[in-house]
Image (spheres, rainbow, N blue to C red):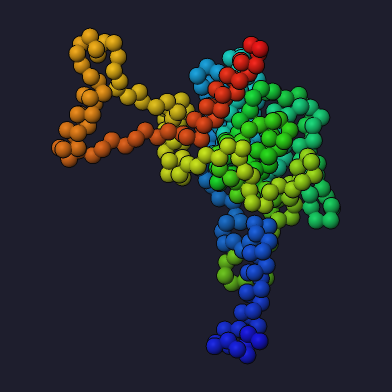
Amino acid sequence: MLKSHYVKPDALSDAELARATLLGVLERIGPGASLIPAAAGVSSATEPSPFYVEILDGRVGYLRLGDLSRNNLGELDAALRQQLKDAGIKTAILDLRATPASSDFELAAEVIKRFCAKGKPLFTLKKAAGKGDRMFTSNMDPAFQGLLIVLLDESTSGAPEAIASVLRAQAGALLVGEKTTGQAFEFSDVPLRGNSNGVVLRVAVAEVALPDGGSMPREGVKPDIAVEMPDAMEREVMRLSREKGVAATVAETERAHMNEAALVAGKNPELDALQAAQRLRAAGAERPKPPAIDVQLQRALDLVTTVSLFETKRAQK
């Protein structure tokens, strides 16, 4: 009917209809399959994302996982068993925002084991018709069992999504940040025969099944507490944290305020600061940029404070 009625019937050749059918199928099955440039299927040298640890306010262990690699896993072990343990830290924030997309689910399971009780099922990597399914179970005592918060963003993809979901299900972790990509699959890149467009077919060959038997959400992992953060701000925060430490990205500069010393001296610091800013604007000076604040990490720290206050109140009853 289209061929007989469309104003440009030549545009509906068998080849064009076949191409449209393929694109429609790929759109319907979402991230499960896609056509990608051939170069994207070849691993290339990228800037490494190292592991980072810092103790914030003497009470919270901040752990930025970085690349999902054996080296960073060893760094995580050292941080959990030495720095956090020696400091008596009972709360940890695991930051997955700087963890690139990965399909290394074996390493993902190793990360999860550091926080889950021994013997707990973690997840199953399920393939078509159940052929070659792989089940991952914690076979070690956890290195950390306190309050755990996981930071996510919209680029969190693949195995890191499984880490976040399983830690929520099996370690009671709270997720803070943005919804993830929804690509917790094991992919295989298939070259196309007779292809001259420089693309390959990337197809999901296995998906993650959670301990309760359900699949990972196709629309992405939703955080328990949603906190949006512009990409540019996140990049600036990461840069600043590498230079000055993570604490510098959550400590706001104290503004001038009235105090007893100012009253005795007959001054008003708030008014003085306002007048100084007005003079700068009148002179054509650029307005100073606001400090880069990691709002997602700040919300996680606020959550830690809230939970601590609640537990203190409950213990007093």
Vertical relation: 71 (above or below) 213: above
Q: Position of residue 158 (x, y in %)?
A: 65, 47
Q: Residue at x 66, y 77 (%)?
A: 18
Q: Is residue 196 above or below residue 175?
A: below
- The answer to whether residue 103 is above or below residue 21 is above
Q: Please identify the quadrant where the N terminus is shown.
A: bottom right
Q: Is residue 191 visible?
A: no
Q: Which quadrant of the rendered structure holds the C terminus?
A: top right
Would residue 304 be seen by someone viewing this image from the given angle? yes
**Residue found farthest to the front:** 317
Q: Position of residue 78 (x, y in %)?
A: 63, 23
Q: Is residue 235 left or right of residue 192?
A: left
The percent coordinates of residue 115 (x first, y second) are 70, 28
Residue at the spot 60% in from the left edge and 34% down from the top edge: 150
Q: Could you tell whether 185 is left or right of 94 in the image?
A: right
**Left/right of residue 205 with respect to residue 295 in the rendered view:** right
- Residue 52, given in percent of the width and then of the height, sits at 54, 29
Question: Could you tell me how many numbered marks the image carries?
Answer: 0
Q: Nearer the viewer, residue 113 or 70?
A: 113
Q: Residue furthest bottom?
A: 4
Quadrant housing residue 209 = top right
Relative vertical location of residue 25 with respect to residue 57 in this rendering, above or below: below
Residue at horizontal 80 percent and vertical 56 percent from the top = 128
The residue that appears at 63% across and 69% down in the rendered structure is: 23
Question: Looking at the rendering, which quadrant does residue 26 occupy?
Answer: bottom right
Along the viewing direction, whichever of 13 and 201 lies nearer the viewer: 13
